[in-house]
């Protein structure tokens, strides 16, 4: 397998982008990524695009072909593949794109993700999101995503003493980071009281414990590492790309305080590289709810199981902490454009490793981790990105 | 790249399977394919599953994780990836599974497809199918899939003298083949009059020019060719696997009598193998409408452009013709289980190459072609399968 690098990235602003269509989002992200890489469209060999529920949101499936057309690459007739893995669609698309280059099959691959969640034709958003959980054993009985993560939060609180204040500190940190990110949806700082006084969505999760779904699109350009310097001044190496799975339904799992798919994916990534949690300088993790970031801290090995809440008391995960988490603002403040989220995470890590993250820059960042989850942990993807 | 073989296959019956759920379909196809291959579940390294509009049909996305759970493979935490490419979802899943084994990354990969189109929660089927076309430039203006293929039929008739009788002969042949296939949806023979007297759906396409969407699931087990004989008495080699794309919308194409994505995919497959149309003993092609089979005959090189209709007057494509097409009954008579269709095609070719196709067996079949199309040709996949 060849080593693979990221030579271009782009994201659109996250938000309720009423005046921007799905195809405009794709065009903006795709063209800017190609320009960032300094390649020509005709050099592209294949495309992988993550989209979560485009059929339900905007009545448009088959977005691979649409993306080829919008990008003006249809005359190339390149293979274009849409990946769906719930909120991990972007991460899985990146994994597949990585494999396509690493295997020697293709040299230049576009990996993207796009989702249009506002201004949609497909009905109620909560109902659409429920399609990522187990329709027959969870959603039909009324379980929404907040309620599934609320079960995990309750479990974590019961067994590990995690508190609502710990959860709130995740939101406060991520909103602070988002305030420094011009592409973030939420750019206002909040306090612990903001979270604790916000409406209860699914006890113990308040409104401010939940990440907002947003519109957005993002794209990366991948190529073999040994060709990367012909294009990028500072190519970023994909040191590891690992994808894992678990049961779709929570009721089939042995416990609710961990995502085994995350643990398996990161174990693979650490084994492949010889790195461990102490080598990681920063991470973008899948904080679809505040409890999810607590579990990610533990499952990724940054703190011991059960210590995720306590880590928040020690400010370990702030921009200047020992392991900064979600410098972009995370799903919570930058926004969660569903099928594109995994690509947004990689974009942020690339910016940080290149020293281009402006006011939220982590000093001396050399190795970053991306952690993207589908549903309530039925899919997890971990990428380790590294300065070369 | 390593050579790849198919060592196990399985399909469920096609039909309106009111008493069988989506997950039961997946379980039946998956378990039977694993048994057919003679492997154990724990040997499986990865899974690719095609599903077209499961979110809209049954409110269930994230079917990769669901499939892992249903198969009882969740403890393995293997990468499981859902592919969506309209009606080519199954073919693209097979292409990705092929690449995963060919690259040396994985040894044993399950490739499947599943769709539940009856007994659904998601509203009107025609509307859901329109999600595979261009929502903004086609569907919003009232263009349904039959009307898009009707445009192609009109164009073909105008420029090449193709007639409604030519189209009807496709349906008659495929229904005859379906009458010999116990897993087919339609098992009654029809006549040219049956087609011409049936309701007009979108002029010139009658009801019997249109393939029925059905429920169904199918699975294949892939492994490296050099390990295949440890498992299968008669492994079938994937001699070529090619995926291509084109514009999503018809209005962006230069002409309407060809699918350029099909031509590009089959050219790649022929180049890779050194084979040409004359080497192919039989083919399963994407006859979502009768005109689609006419175009496929031409685009795949079996007859010259414009001669697809005339080929029907010469009975070239019957079971005992020079190039038997759709011995299974095709999408038209076996049924079109959307995201699973590409896998059904491969299953039929494997049966034929192994001499196990019973009453519809093609004599001395050694090389077979599968041709799977998404939407109105925005995606096309061609596989060449071969006796080793």
Image (cartoon, coloured by chain):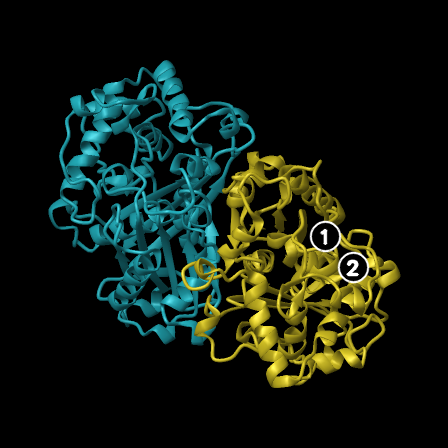
Chain colours: A yellow, B cyan
Q: What element carries label 1?
A: strand
Of the image marks 2 and 1, the number of the one nearer the N terminus: 1
Q: Where is residue B281 in the image (x, y as percent from the top left)?
A: 24, 43
Q: In this view, does A355 lie to the left or right of B119?
A: right
Name the element at disc 2: helix
Residue B170: image location, x then y, percent? 24, 29
Q: How far apart are marks 2 and 1 (CA)?
A: 9 Å
**Chain containing the residue with disc 1:** A
Q: Evaluate whether residue A83 shows in this view.
A: yes
Residue in view at x 30 percent, y 60 percent: B24
The residue singled out by tag 1 in the image is A9
Residue at numbered disc 2: A351
- x, y (%) of residue A139? 47, 59
| On-image quarter of the C terminus of chain B | bottom left
* Residue A292 located left or right of residue A312: left
Labels 2 and 1 touching (C-beta < 8 A) = yes
Image height of B43 relative to A289, above or below: below
In this rendering, would A367 be left or right of B76? right
């Amino acid at each position: 397998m060849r080593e693979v690098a990221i030579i271009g990235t782009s994201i659109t602003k996250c938000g309720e982008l009423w005046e921007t269509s799905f195809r405009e989002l794709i065009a903006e992200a795709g063209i800017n990524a190609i320009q960032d890489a300094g390649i020509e469209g005709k050099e592209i060999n294949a495309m992988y695009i993550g989209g979560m529920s485009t059929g339900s949101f905007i009545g448009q499936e088959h977005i691979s072909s649409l993306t080829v057309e919008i990008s003006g690459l249809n005359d190339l007739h390149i293979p274009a593949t849409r990946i769906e893995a719930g909120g991990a669609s972007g991460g899985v698309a990146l994994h597949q794109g990585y494999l396509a280059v690493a295997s020697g099959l293709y040299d230049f691959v576009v990996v993207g993700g796009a989702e249009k969640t506002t201004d949609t034709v497909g009905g109620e958003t909560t109902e659409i999101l429920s399609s990522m959980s187990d329709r027959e054993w969870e959603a039909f009985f009324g379980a929404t995503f907040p309620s599934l993560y609320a079960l995990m939060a309750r479990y974590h609180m019961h067994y590990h003493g995690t508190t609502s204040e710990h959860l709130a500190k995740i939101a406060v940190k991520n909103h602070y980071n988002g305030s420094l990110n011009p592409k973030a949806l939420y750019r206002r700082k909040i306090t612990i009281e903001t979270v604790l006084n916000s409406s209860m969505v699914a006890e113990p999760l308040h409104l401010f414990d939940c990440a907002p779904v947003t519109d957005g699109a993002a794209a990366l350009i991948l190529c073999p590492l040994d060709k990367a310097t012909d294009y990028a001044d500072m190519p970023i190496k994909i040191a590891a790309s690992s994808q894992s799975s678990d049961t779709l339904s929570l009721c089939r799992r042995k416990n609710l305080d961990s995502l085994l798919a995350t643990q398996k994916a990161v174990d693979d990534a650490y084994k492949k590289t010889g790195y461990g949690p102490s080598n990681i300088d920063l991470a973008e993790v899948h904080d679809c709810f505040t409890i999810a970031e607590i579990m990610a801290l533990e499952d990724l090995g940054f703190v011991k199981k059960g210590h995720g809440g306590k880590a928040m008391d020690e400010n370990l995960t702030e921009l200047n902490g020992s392991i900064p988490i979600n410098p972009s603002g995370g799903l919570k403040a930058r926004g969660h454009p569903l099928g594109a989220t995994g690509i947004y995470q990689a974009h942020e890590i690339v910016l940080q490793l290149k020293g281009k993250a402006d006011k939220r820059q982590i000093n001396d960042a050399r190795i970053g981790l991306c952690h993207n989850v589908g549903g309530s942990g039925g899919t997890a993807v971990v990428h380790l990105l590294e300065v070369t």
